[in-house]
Image (cartoon, rainbow, N blue to C red):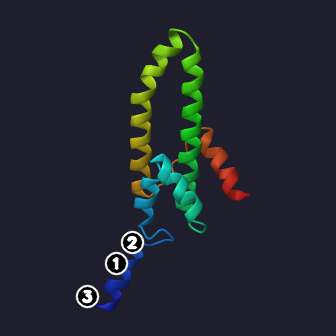
């Protein structure tokens, strides 16, 4: 491989503090524990920090919603049964968007993440 071709290939697969391509690291952030680890490890890369912080906020929000629904008799219990499949679809969608290299913002949570990253 010649020098210009090698440089172009390296530019397409940027590495970061974690040692992974940005889109792969962003995708892995939506696995909750990995998102926490990446949040503490990555200090420079805004793309990875965005996805890691959004994944953590999403995990906390889903945990609180499931706690509240668990306290509500019958209707809350039925809705909490739907939370599992809905959460799975949402996490897969967010992983897909991160893999594409986009910073897709979830309503409310995405805005909170943007504020945190600016400060």
Instruction: Give the labeled residue for mark 1.
Output: 9
Q: Position of residue 95 (x, y in %)?
A: 41, 48
Mark 1 nearby-residue class (10 Å; few <14, some 14–19, many ≥20): few
Q: Position of residue 94 (x, y in %)?
A: 44, 45
Q: Identify the residue shown where x is 39% and y is 42%.
A: 92
The quadrant of the image that shows the N terminus is bottom left
The residue indicated by pointer 3 is 1
CA–CA distance in space, label 1 to label 3: 10 Å
> Which element type, helix, strand or loop, lies under badge 3?
loop
Give the residue at the far bottom of this rendering.
Answer: 3
Q: CA distance from mark 2 to mark 3?
A: 16 Å
Q: Residue at x 60, y 22 (%)?
A: 68
Question: Residue 31 placed where, x, y %?
Answer: 44, 48
Q: Nearer the viewer, residue 91 or 4?
A: 91
Relative depth, front residue between 36 and 20: 36
Q: Are marks 2 and 3 in contact (CB under 8 Å)?
A: no
Q: Are marks 1 and 3 in contact (CB under 8 Å)?
A: yes
* SS class, disc 1: helix
- Can you say whether 74 is above or below 64 in the image? above
Q: Residue furthest left?
A: 1
Q: Secondary structure at mark 2?
A: loop
In the rendered image, the vertical position of residue 34 relative to residue 10, given as above or below: above
Residue at numbered disc 2: 13
User: Tag 3 or tag 2, which sits nearer the N-term?
Assistant: 3
The one of 2 and 63 positioned closer to us in this rendering:
63
Residue located at (63% from left, 49% from top): 113
Which class describes the residues within 10 Å of circle 2: few (<14), some (14-19), or many (20+)? few
| Circles 1 and 2: CB atoms closer than 8 Å | yes
Give the image location of residue 26, x and y in percent.
Answer: 46, 57
Q: CA distance from mark 1 to mark 2?
A: 7 Å
The earlier-in-sequence mark between 1 and 3 is 3
Left or right: residue 117 versus residue 11 is: right
């Amino acid at each position: 491989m010649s020098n210009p071709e090698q440089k172009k290939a390296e530019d397409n697969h940027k590495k970061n503090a974690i040692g992974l391509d940005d889109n792969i690291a962003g995708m892995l952030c939506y696995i909750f524990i990995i998102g926490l680890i990446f949040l503490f490890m990555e200090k420079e890369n805004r793309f990875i920090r965005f996805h890691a912080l959004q994944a953590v906020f999403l995990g906390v929000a889903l945990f609180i919603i499931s706690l509240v629904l668990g306290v509500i008799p019958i209707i809350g219990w039925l809705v909490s049964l739907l939370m599992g499949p809905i959460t799975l679809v949402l996490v897969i969608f967010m992983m897909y968007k991160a893999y594409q290299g986009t910073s897709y913002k979830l309503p409310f949570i995405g805005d909170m993440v943007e504020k945190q990253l600016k400060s």
